[in-house]
Amino acid sequence: MTVLSIIKVDTILFDKTGTLTDEQPKVGKIIVFDNYERDEILTYAAAAERKLSHPIAKAIVQKAKN
């Protein structure tokens, strides 16, 4: 497994439209870069967010569980 270098990440995009209609954001699309796979990026993000309780963290962790 390759180690993700978060130092190289300069942009993260969030579309918060779902919070207005569903009251809970959802992960819509994961855009991969370099040689990373979609599930690998999601795993790293969920690991970073797993102990947090804010709505975006919950959405990321839920997507990883699914």
Image (tube, rainbow, N blue to C red):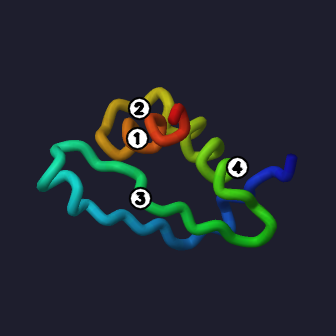
> Which of these two is toward me, 39 or 58?
39
Percent from the top left, x then y, of residue 29?
Answer: 47, 62
Looking at the image, which residue is at 65% across and 56% down? 38
Q: Position of residue 44 (x, y in %)?
A: 64, 45
Indicate which disc, 3 or 1, sits on the residue closer to the N terminus: 3
Q: Residue furthest front?
A: 66
Determine which residue is flagged by label 4. Answer: 40
Please tell me in which quadrant of the rendered image residue 37 appears. Answer: bottom right
The residue that mark 3 highlights is 28
**Left or right for 26, reference 42:** left
Dot 1 falls on a residue whose secondary structure is helix
Per the image, the residue denoted by label 1 is 57
| Closer to viewer: mark 2 or mark 3 | 3
Inspect the image, locate mark 4, and give the three-letter code of the amino acid beneath it.
Glu
- Circle nearer the N terminus (1, 4): 4
**Marks 2 and 3: CB-CB under 8 Å?**
no
Residue at the spot 46% in from the left edge and 43% down from the top edge: 60
- Please report contact status of discs 2 and 1: CB closer than 8 Å, yes or no: yes
Judged from the image, the secondary structure of the residue bearing numbered disc 3 is: loop
